[in-house]
Image (spheres, coloured by chain):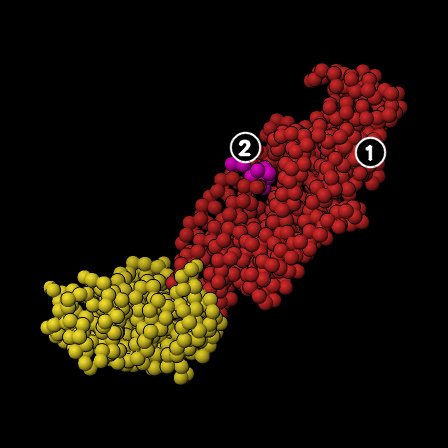
Chain colours: A yellow, B red
Amino acid sequence: MVEVAVAVTGLRRRFGRKEALQELTFEIPAGGVHALVGRNGAGKSTLFRILLGFLAPSAGRSAVLGAPSGALPPQIRGRIGWVTEEHALPPWMAVGTLAALQRAHYPRWREATFREVLAPFAVDSRQAVGGLSRGERAGLSLALALAQGPELLLLDEPTLGLDVVAKHAFLDALLFAGEHQECTVVYASHQMDEVERLADHLWVLKEGRLVSASSPEALWERIGGWLVELPHPPDRARIPGLLQARALEGRWEVIVLDPPEAFPKLLDEVGGTAVEPLSLGFDRAINAFLSVGSTVGGAL
Amino acid sequence: MKALLLGEWHRLGRLALGFALLHLGVLAGMAFYGDLFVPSPTKVRLGLAAYGLGGLLLGVAQFAVYRRRNLWSFLLHRPLAPGKIFLALAAAGGLVLALVIALPLLLVTLLLDGFSAQWVDGRQYLMVPFLWGLAMAFYVGGCYLALRARWSAALVLVLLLPCLNGAVPDAWVFVPLVLGLVWLGGLALTAFQPDLSASPRGIRATVLEALPTQCALFPAVAFVLVLVYSVAVIHWEAGWRGFAVFGWNDYFPIGSYERAAYLDHRELVAHALRLGDSPRGPGLAVVVAGAEDGVEGGADERVALWPEIGAAPVRHALLFQERGESLLGPDGATRWVFSHDRMQFHGRNTRTGAAVGWLEPPLAEVPVVAADGSMVAGGALYQAEFGAGRVERLWQAPSGERLMGPAVPFDGGEAILSDGALYLSDDSGWSGSPTALPLPGAVENLERAVVVKLPESRLITFFLGQLSERDAYPARLVVLELAETGAVTTITDRALVAGAPAWVRHRGFLVSPLLQALVDFVWRDPMAPRWRQIPNGVWAAALGLALVSMFLTAGLARRRGPGTAFWLWTAMGFFCGLPAFVSLLLLRPRSEP
């Protein structure tokens, strides 16, 4: 078992003029569930493709389970599970045939895990993959990945497009596997309820840069919110650390990163009245962090 | 690997079975309603195109489906080396092609051999692995096209050309076929990598991809020189005449090869007569040029003959070189097909399909057949006597000579061309001794011989220059007058100069001496000159162009990426010339990271 599951140094990737990844450097330690969050286009999928060697970086290097991404040997690939956003599986194959194909290639195949993970999705082994619903394909995709007995499981927005029931079934299956397997999970998502439920560590990507690496709670605690009446729209020059501001029935909801203890006093100084602290949920706080710079109802 | 192969078989097997039945039906129909093993050249070309295209489409379709990004990662992200994954998929493709192509072909051949009166040669069995191999080679090419997803990648299919055009007519064709298959397989293997957006790198991958691409680009670059010459030189000097070659004829000086090359037979004879030193020449030219067309036995009766060198039959040739070695009996009730195994014609009733028997005796060589039942084989002229069930020898050329085509009727007798002389028989046929007119040069260089009947004599014009374009042989016009007494007088014997400048005639050498030598070797081109025959100016220009190409290629390669590939591309720029530069532009676009 390696100590570092993923290591990335100075990673850059350019698509034409757009920099999808910019000087990315970090290490993901082995063990636990690591959520990689970011808005669409933040570079999460690009990062996964580079990590698995399906895309060459424009600069920098990366390694997965100690092996360079550009030349992952088959035995290392066998230790990495990979679940994609589209759950793309050969549509012409029957579920049983597909399982048999994977079983033949993975010596640590766990049939019991495959059955248990797939059970809530009620998939018949004779069904063609092309005939499965998106939720069923998601379950099958996860069951195939977990049954391999991976040391590292990479999931790229796997619950995207799933209904609530399918999503819960998927997350339950993932949690079940997390409890029964020693596996490092790297989970890309912008669904904060999932992240809150699953993640031990939170990695935040913004415009191709890593802007935060901590536990989810640690980042959540750094974000505070207030309702305040202001004579003018809030802006960053007057309110340091302002993440997001929203006009609500004549008042402003302001969300701030790393607010000082005397933040209400600071609001007073900029003309704020009726200052009232807000209780921010994880979802609301992290989304504000991701959408830093946005405002609704006035300029920042 | 086995699991992947089975998975692919699950995907393609049912479709393959459908196509196999369809193919079987088509073959059975062709065997029932026609003669499957005596196809016309058009049918042969269509058949080769269909099998090649079938393989190509299967390769493209099979791999293009996986090329969708995440399905690609599903396929490649497993504890199996990419090479093994590719081999498993390609093995499934090979099985599909065996089911769709080889099995129906073999079944029909076996059925015809065992349960019909049709005689089946060994070469017809050999067509089964050949066509499967051809489809397989195109299939692997299709895999490569799907993986590279660039139109320029199709240029590598040039590797299969030697298998298609009959340049290697017999079983030796399996050598270029296997070479092409292995080469394309190696290419597809290098392209079968997790990162499909990147070009295959490394010396082996670069050579595998660049060399055939450059070979394909080579004639195109050489053709640009012809275009430059025709547009910038000829049209600049002589005015616009379109691209028709005939429009250029009078641009070239009198006494040049090009001036004579595109004249019709009568014009050629008149032109040759005027070129000669004999005082009778101009007068005879007026008679020939002014003669009335199409009068049988008239003063202008004429016939043209040319050696059928490229189309000479080869024993055990596979069917793609088929020349229709078959005859229809006089009543139309019997079709006689030549067997290469027994070297005899085998007859079958055209309505019932019942065997009629063999024409005796066996021939020493594969014949070239004329519609009237006459044929030439080696140095002998034969006539089929269907009623007697025999092939009678009419005439034998002098020892060591080969006849180059069937006999042609002329002036009550016949004319026939050998590799040593033109023979004219009189109305008593070939039983007497025909008049022999020795060829004034190598038969390979003979474009045509034209025989014209005049009231008191015959004019025989030999136009040599078939292989003169690149100075391998000299061009020449010779006119002989054959009197009724049998006396032969030379009216014209004139060497022709080359009309086009040396840089146009040696354009291939100018573009790349190495690629030109490779092409000459592969096609065994008789036009290839000895290197010392190439003018010094062309050598100097070729060296200059190679240096220019080397610097251009090196500059571009430096921008596209460093490392060993830079030196490789620079070397290719020098040795392969401008095609190397163009191939670098196509194979390593700037958009790659």
Disc 1 on helix, strand or loop? strand
The residue under label 1 is: B495
What segment carries the magenta color? Answer: B33-43
* Chain of the residue displaying label 2: B
The three-letter amino acid code for the residue at tag 1 is Ala
In this picture, residue A182 sits left or right of residue B414: left
Name the spot of residue B290 as percent of width and height, x first. 74, 16
Disc 2 versus disc 1: nearer the observer = 1
The three-letter amino acid code for the residue at tag 2 is Arg
Name the one closer to the observer, B372 or A29: A29
Q: What residue is at 37 percent from the left and 68 percent from the top?
A: A208
Name the spot of residue B193 as percent of width and height, x first. 49, 64
Secondary structure character of the magenta stretch overall? loop
- Estimate how packed mark 1 is, as few (under 14), some (14 to 19) or many (20 or more) residues with alpha carbons within 10 Å: some
Instruction: Identify the mark at residue B351; answer none if there is no mark.
Output: 2
Q: What residue is at 77 percent from the left and 25 percent from the top?
A: B271
Proximity of marks 2 and 1: CB atoms separated by less than 8 Å: no
Instruction: Identify the mark at residue B247; answer none if there is no mark.
Output: none
Name the spot of residue B368 as percent of width and height, x first. 70, 36
Name the spot of residue B191 as percent of width and height, x first. 51, 61
Q: What residue is at 72 percent from the left and 25 percent from the top?
A: B265
Q: What residue is at 51 percent from the left and 45 percent from the top?
A: B50
